[in-house]
Amino acid sequence: MKVYIKPDKKDWGAIIARPVMDTMALQDKVRSVLQDVKANGDQAVRKYTLQFDGVSTEQLAVSDNEINEASQSLSPSLKRAIETAAGNIRLFHEKQVQRPEIIETMPGVKCWRRSVGIEKTGLYIPGGTAPLFSTVLMLGIPAKIAGCKEIILCTPPSLFSARRRAGDEAAIHPAILFAAQLTGVTKIFKVGGVQAIGAMAYGTETIPSVYKIFGPGNQYVNCAKQLVQLDGVAIDMPAGPSEICVLADETCNPAFVAADLLSQAEHGADSQVLLICSAKQIIDEVEKEMNIQLPGLPRREIARQVLDQSNAVVLSHIGEAVDLVNEYAPEHLILACREIETIANKIVNAGSVFLGNYSPESAGDYASGTNHTLPTNGFARCYSGVSVDSFVKKITYQQITKEGLLQVGGTVEQMAAAEGLDAHRNSISIRINADRQK
């Protein structure tokens, strides 16, 4: 990690910069795949699945038999763990549902708002280097709570699935299938990458189109999501590589901090970690612990690449540290320091905040109850993480009595006339005058 000791604010931009990629070249590649899927449907989907994932997928849809086999193949302990996590996530998200409240803004003028589930939603679940069945819970549960009628799931067939046997044309990790069934996903397809996003956006002979697409992915998937958005398909949020920031002082446990940084670093080579400390000694102790823990990690080479391109900063004043955190706008933020509640209330840009030495980011990734689908790449400045609200549209209603129209009508007539919209004014006047003529 590169260490900055009390840097000037003019240097903060370099410290919090995200990895830069050639977006034009990326968009050209992704756009060509999307156009092919849009024009040629299942044929294109199968072609790119063979090309990119190296597996044949004659049957794109997952059968009930495959789901049943997947459930039977999982250990009871893993199924219990998934069910426990699902229970916590469900409990947290159920509390987000709000009942419509009728507001009488004037006598006889009633207004209210109702949440309606988006009818057709698509969930993208990564399954390349790691089968993220936890993401099925994070997306499927709020979708079901929101009342989405059709919940489509696409995930790449995996070459290392526990189900894969000689002669299998494609396989999905059984935990993904178990979680999908548990959360109420209606249809599952063995499709990943850009071709999955294209299929859900435009529809194919087998895969239905959806109104909104959710889920994390690599740079190709995220680019595809942003491109289909231009064609009128909504997405959960723009996203980039995963990231974490830890704000620590001398009350932190260096071994815990090291473990948190490594847990994020193992996601992928383009991930990023940022450590902000009150003293250089803390950085030294954390790096010592990382050197102890890193050799034992199966994904240590990926983590090592991430650490080589990540930063550690010493800022002696907590106010400056908070300012740097807010400027960075991290996906995940851990506060391993004094007065965590006070500091937490000063955080205005973050996807999810973890308070104290015993609140690891991995708990939120899996089972504490909060959602782990969060804004990255600085988008926490203006986007929220996924919630039940992400899966609903909110419709406003109003009901006005004759008496209510007399109350509000004069205001509307004057405003419409001032804007030069006489037909708007007349829609009020004609009603008031008709009532007076009776």
Image (spheres, rainbow, N blue to C red):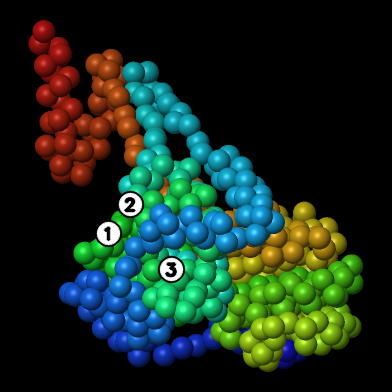
Q: Amino acid at mark 3?
A: Thr
Q: CA distance from mark 3 to mark 2?
A: 17 Å
> Which quadrant is the N terminus positioned in?
bottom right
| Labels 1 & 3 near each other (Cβ < 8 A) | no
Please identify the quarter of the rendering in which residue 308 is found: bottom right
The residue positioned 55% from the left and 41% from the top of the image is 94
Residue 436, percent from left and from top: 14, 12
Q: Secondary structure at mark 3?
A: strand
User: Against 268, is 179 above or below?
Assistant: above
Of residues 350 and 169, which is closer to you in this image? 169
Q: Quadrant of the C terminus?
A: top left
Residue 385 percent location from the top left of the image:
53, 59
Q: Amino acid at mark 2?
A: Lys
For label 1, the SS is: loop
Is residue 10 at all visible to an observer of this figure?
A: no
Residue occupied by mark 1: 208
The residue pinned by badge 2 equals: 120
Q: Residue at x 72, y 78 (%)?
A: 262
Residue at label 3? 155
Residue at (82%, 71%) from the top-left corner?
256
